[in-house]
Image (cartoon, rainbow, N blue to C red):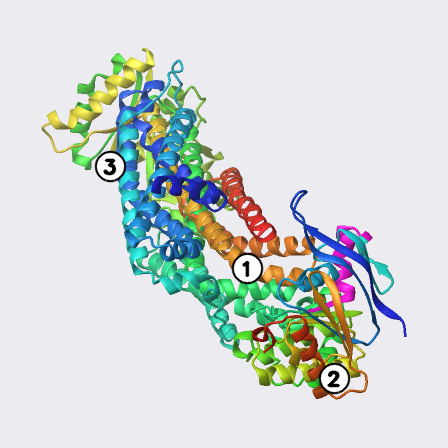
Amino acid sequence: MYSKLSLRNIKRSVRDYTIYFLTITFAVCLFYSFNSLHAQQAMLKISTSQEDMLQNLTNMIGAISVFISVVLAFLIIYANGFLIRRRKKELGMYMTLGMSKFHISRILVIETLFIGLISLVIGIALGVLVSQGLSILTAALFEVDLKAYTFVFSGDATVKTILYFGIIFLFVMAFNVFIINRYKLIDLLTASKKNQHVKLRKTSTAISIFILSIILIGTAYSLMLKYGLLESMTLVWISVGLGAIGTFLFFFSLSGFLLNLFKKNEKLYYKDINMFVLRQINSKVNTTFISMTIICLMLFFTMGVLSTGFSLKNSLEKDLTVTTPYDATFYVYHYDEEQQEANDMFNSLQLEQYGDTVTYSEYDTGEGINSYLLNYADSESKDLLKGMPLYAIKQSSYQKLMELQGKDPISLKHDETLFLTNKKEMTNTIERFLNKENEVEIANKTYTIASEGYQFTSVKTDIMALEFFVAVLPDAVVKDMSAITTVANLQYDVEKQTADAAIYQTLETYNDKYQGDLYLLGMTKTLAYESASGTSTTVVYIGVYLGIVFLISSAAILALQQLSEASDNMVRYDTLKKIGVTKAEVNKSIFRQIFIYFMMPLSLAIIHSIFGIIVVNDALAVAGQASVLVPSLLTAGVIVLVYGGYFIATYSGYKSIVNNK
Amino acid sequence: MSSILEVTHIEKYFGSKGNITKAIDDISFEVEKGEFVGIMGPSGSGKTTLLNCLSTIDAVTTGHITIDNQDITTLKKKKLETFRRDELGFIFQDFNLLDTLTAYENIALALTIKKTKPHEIHSIVEDIAKKLEINEVLDKFPYEMSGGQQQRVASARAIATNPSLVLADEPTGSLDSKSSRLLLESFKKLNEEYKATILMVTHDAFTASYADRILFIKDGKIFNELIKGSDTRKGFFNRIMEVVTLLGGDLDDVF
């Protein structure tokens, strides 16, 4: 009997439940898809090193899922609370009919169970579909090929999803019972009347608070723009704090401020039903500024992470074409007197078995890069130069290194010098320097600069471009400087995969067996690419996971707030219709009201994100110039899709509530 | 005198075949410009249905209603909306003020809907507020006002657009006797000074006694008609009471 009643209730209030149901289904789908990542291995052709990375990623997502489930729990309880409030009168009716609170709780528990079960089943089914697609994304991000298609189904992820959401639903049920027990019958029956008491705050103070909020947000922006992300962590937190408080005050005062502003402009205020729409928004935002703030910050996070996450991948990989000229590079840092030990070490590795090798050393000139380039530096290179020493390599090493790369070395006379860089951001600065200078003094000796001036190239394989400015000097001079790094570069002539695997093995185990003071480091071209894609995949996955959950939460909260209002507003719109506002105008005003309401947190979040992306980009510039355009467009697409979808669902739901009574 | 409202042989049925209720059963009457007409009748007599038909919220089954020389029974739905906006003013039992707007804005809204120029709005609102003695509460929100004040604001809103016909549905239904008296005095004033044509539905004899003419409805038909003529309000009230008694009206309904 009770389950029949519950089922009928759900059927009847499908309109109210749509958003609730959709949100849970989405959440389940996301939760399953991301937690099934491990099972996707079945479809990917990955190496041992990538397997390790995927395992790390899986662990990380597992940890984040706990956090996500807390967020979702709050969202679902919040949504559920809205639905109950909307049904106060119905519940009151049950009570007057003699149903006990226990029975009413039971109805609600069964309802939650129904919805939970249905959305779990549909959500997991959708999740299984989505995770097939996710495998393709994983393959693309890891830059590996897909094996023959296999249907991926993760039992672990399914059990985990059911477990986590089961717990969430238990919380929801407990919450419902708690709420019902607190209600008094009189409150339930007069609920609809009570709601009409609108809190309206005086608008005069709004202006000053609004200005304060703008100042706070502006300060946060300028702090970040001036000092960047890497200067000090305290500063970053201060900016974040200022920004958050500013955002809060912004929404606290926004509607009052706007109302004042519009009131001054009589032409706008007294046009059609503008003043009604404005007052409508004002009364709503006045009571929801806290959730507005949270939503705005969540959207900011989503946009920031999605657009910079993808650009991290771009920026990490962009340099690799330049920074990986050799199949493999080994190197050790050492003191001058350890040169022999380093040479012995490389000999013991017997690198010749893999192909051609060139071993060379880098020497410290005792000079800093700043003393040459600072006067020519631009904003891009200025930060890079700070405190960087000038290293030198021998002319003979340079020749061999270029030959190993298959390039023709620039021929250098005995007293000539040539500069090398593999950092794109440095080239303009270096060109300005070379335009002015024909000669250069290094370690008390003067050299003519070769007519070519500098060469854009790397002399070892690395993940990042760190050879900002290296001098090629005559062998005789360099010999007297102190060697600090010895490097062995390797170009395979055996099969790549076997060599890569053997070298990965060597790098993992060599130092454990080695008895001396030196520490062998190394990188293969393959590892460099794998690590770049691994890092960016991790960031992208976590960003997408958190970002979409935040996006859905934001949109769902906004939608529910609007819809829960709709029945209260029905009276107002009815009045409007009675005094002669046409249905088309009523619909227009509903559209505007919801649109403005949805756009408010989004607009501020977009502005926040623009500044955030600029700052993050500056920080990433050390690793290589990143393009945010494509990721930003992608992010915008996702937001338009999800946010827009919720907006349309809200608008049509709202309209049907108001128009059909 | 030209007639602003002409109702000719209207009928309104509810229900489907086999089970038809005639809510209005052949009613015809006219209202002259500047008249203050009351419609009385016990519960279920069809007076609310009649008002709904006059206010274009509901459509008649047969017959014609002409307001200001326009036959509203033949108007299209879209046209009806604009007609309602331009030609009719409404006063409701429960005021129906927008709780998010101040009194001033509530009145102004009726004007902005009609696309009155912003600079004209101010003088119109001030003027009518003075007449109805609500200029003190113009900046207040509905919940800060008494019921009587709210209803006078609602009346101001109904009359501000200068409609051909003001329809009042139990305007004193939610008011105490003192507020009722004040409101009805205002109606009288609006009727006399603005030459507003008012059609008021009520079941309260005291309220009705402020009208110039009263139509009594019972079981969907016009049962009687009273004209105040040169009678005093008190005398008119007594005559109304006689008809109410005749109607079999229970006295509970009267006071």
User: Residue B106's x, y, as percent?
Assistant: 64, 72
Displayed quadrant of residue A291: bottom left
Residue A484's label in the rendered image is 3
SS at mark 2? helix
Residue depicted at 60% across the width and 80% down the height:
B149
Judge whether A251 appears above or below A68 on screen. below
Query: What segment carries the magenta color?
Result: B74-90
| Magenta highlight on residue B77 | yes
Front residue of this view, candidates A215 and B35: B35
Identify the mark at residue A569; answer none if there is no mark.
Answer: 1
What's under tag 3, amino acid-wise?
Ile
The extreme top residue here reads A494
- In the picture of the structure, the residue carrying the numbered disc 2 is B189
Amino acid type, label 1: Asn
Figure quadrant of the C terminus of chain B: bottom right
Q: In terms of image quadrants, where is residue A572?
A: bottom right
Q: CA distance from mark 2 to mark 1?
A: 34 Å
Q: Chain of mark 2?
A: B
Q: Is residue A358 above or below residue A234?
A: above
Task: State the image quarter where residue A456 is shown.
Answer: top left
Label 2 sits on what residue type?
A: Lys
Q: Could one spot residue A383 in this view of the protein?
A: yes
